[in-house]
Image (cartoon, rainbow, N blue to C red):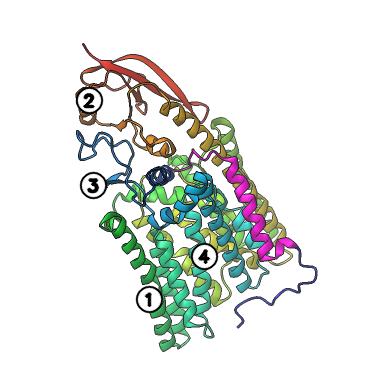
Amino acid sequence: MTTEAPALSRVGVRWWERPLSAAMVLFLLLTAAMFWTDASGVISTDVGGKLATLDAMDRRGDLSPDLGYWAEDLDPDGSLYPMWATYKAGDQWINATTFPMIYAALPLYRLGGARAAGLIPVAGAVVAALAARALSRRLGSDGTTAFWLVGAASPVTVYALDFWEHAPALGLMLWAVVHTLDASRGEGKWTSALAAGLLFGAASSMRQEAFLYGAVAGGALGIRLFSSRLILTGIGRGAAMVGGVAVPVLGTVALETWALGDYSRGARATGTAAAGGGDFVLRVEEAIVTGASPFAQATFPNLAVGILLAIVLFMMGRRADEPDAVRPLAMAAGAVAALWVFDTIRDGLGFVPGLAATTPLAVMAIGRMRGSTDRLLLSAIAIIPLPLVWVFGFTGGAGPQWGGRYILLTGAVLLAAAPSLFDSEVVRPLFHRMLVASALITFAGVAFAVVRTHATADALREIADRDEEVVVFYNAHRPREAGAFFHGQPWLAAHTDDELEEVGELLLDYDVSRFAMVGGWEDDEPPKVPGWEMVEDDMVLLMGRLPVLIAVMEPIH
């Protein structure tokens, strides 16, 4: 069996079919879209922490990820630290979660700020598209459709626009899948297995689910070779893959130990895994939200719509050769799309968290992934990790994401396979219609990224420019979104009654005469701060329509 489709004749091949020219054009398109966003705004609070870290390193001219803390002398434990998920490592205050990406981006940030650093996720999306092309060619297609589908009409397009690690991690993992497929074939080489391990290991420095996908890929590699009676070959390539994973993992440990004095990310991953299986109902809800739902709120009707959509899309793929059977299924999918459009018109653009909702062709492809051992192996890599991710992943953030950010590799692998699964004359029209649907929902995602980054940047810039001596956030996620404005700001965060009491005492000890409390409370009246009273109120608009209340406080005399 050949490892790739026969090479196309170079005569008549158009620029969008040539990998180099297509990659350059996609890079320019994504860069242009990135410039359409506000570099000081973010899609995720994680990005704010990264931007604050890069800004701190750039201002000091050093390599320490320390953010510092202006109130450390009175709050040494950081219970009022203004940025959620900040922890203390030695004498450093750390919020960044991805150190290799931070250090890779630092030269670019020093050269051109957040815009230049943003070229890393853009490049990651292009790498992912090239990997999809390579994988598609190995399944018998020319790879062009898969390239543009993954690069310009999938969730990775949205993640390319924010300084988040998902796009580069996906690019590495998708290439790891390509090499795993090569290594699983009898005529493959141990170097392919080594390359797959290196890539999964490198991706794990940015995304912890890379460990789960890599473990399943390694198991699928061994099973395929063992079932072909290539026992020694399977053992050798499996060992090469494991060895490959170890190299970047040890490098990441060394880097973080050098930067912090310990390996905090490893403890974070262990803690997450140890919590696996807890909050069963919540995990089921979040699995439905990230796997299927077009709606970010996990209400029962929304969850039911998400399940219906996934079933309908799967059956559309399964019965794509039967136009009469597909027609009512397509009408049901269209009804779900109409519900989402109505919701968007009513409430405005928002997160679309479900893989099925943002990547419909991926779910349809599941219904057709049969007929060859290559497809069986890719199905295992794409599908088996899903329950593992949902059981062992973080909880509490299912709604504010686009297309299931922890399961992006599942969607990308299935999208790369889709052109070869829908290549007959009967199913091609359906495939083309779903391509259009994928492009439209991705365009909505790009538009949302633009709107959200501008809206959050404008609101948080206004808060950062306030005249009060201190700003206290009632929601610690909000100042994390303001990472671009974090440097030198006398901010705090408090949510509980005990924390509010601590805030009141701390600010009196600092002789603060006036502070602003930024909302997040549910009532019209702000929470009470012992020793302080509200003297005036104000507000800012988030996303252009959502009021964020601000209470200005002064000491009670």
Q: Does the CB distance between marks 2 and 1 fall below 8 Å?
A: no
**Residue that carries the numbered disc 2 in the rendered image:** 510
In the displayed structure, does residue 360 sit left or right of residue 58? right
Amino acid type of the residue tagged 4 in the rendering: Leu
Per the image, label 3 sits on a secondary structure element best described as: loop
Amino acid type of the residue tagged 1 in the rendering: Gly
Q: Does the CB distance between marks 1 and 3 fall below 8 Å?
A: no
Q: How far apart are marks 2 and 4 (CA)?
A: 53 Å
Place of residue 62 in the rendered image (x, y in percent of width and height, measured from the top left): 36, 50
| Foreground tag (1 vs 3) | 3
Circle on res. 243 = 1
**Residue that carries the numbered disc 3 in the rendered image:** 91
**Residue that carries the numbered disc 4 in the rendered image:** 174
- Can you say whether 232 is above or below 357 in the image? below
Q: In which quarter of the image is residue 135?
A: bottom right
Q: Dot 3 surroundings within 10 Å: few (below 14), some, or many (20 or more)?
A: few
Place of residue 373 in the rendered image (x, y in percent of width and height, measured from the top left): 54, 77
In the displayed structure, does residue 512 sit left or right of residue 24? left
Place of residue 330 in the rendered image (x, y in percent of width and height, measured from the top left): 64, 51
Tell which of 276 and 54 is nearer to you.
54
Q: Residue at x 55, y 61 (%)?
A: 128
Q: Which of marks 2 and 4 is nearer the N terminus?
A: 4
Circle on res. 55 = none
| Foreground tag (3 vs 4) | 3
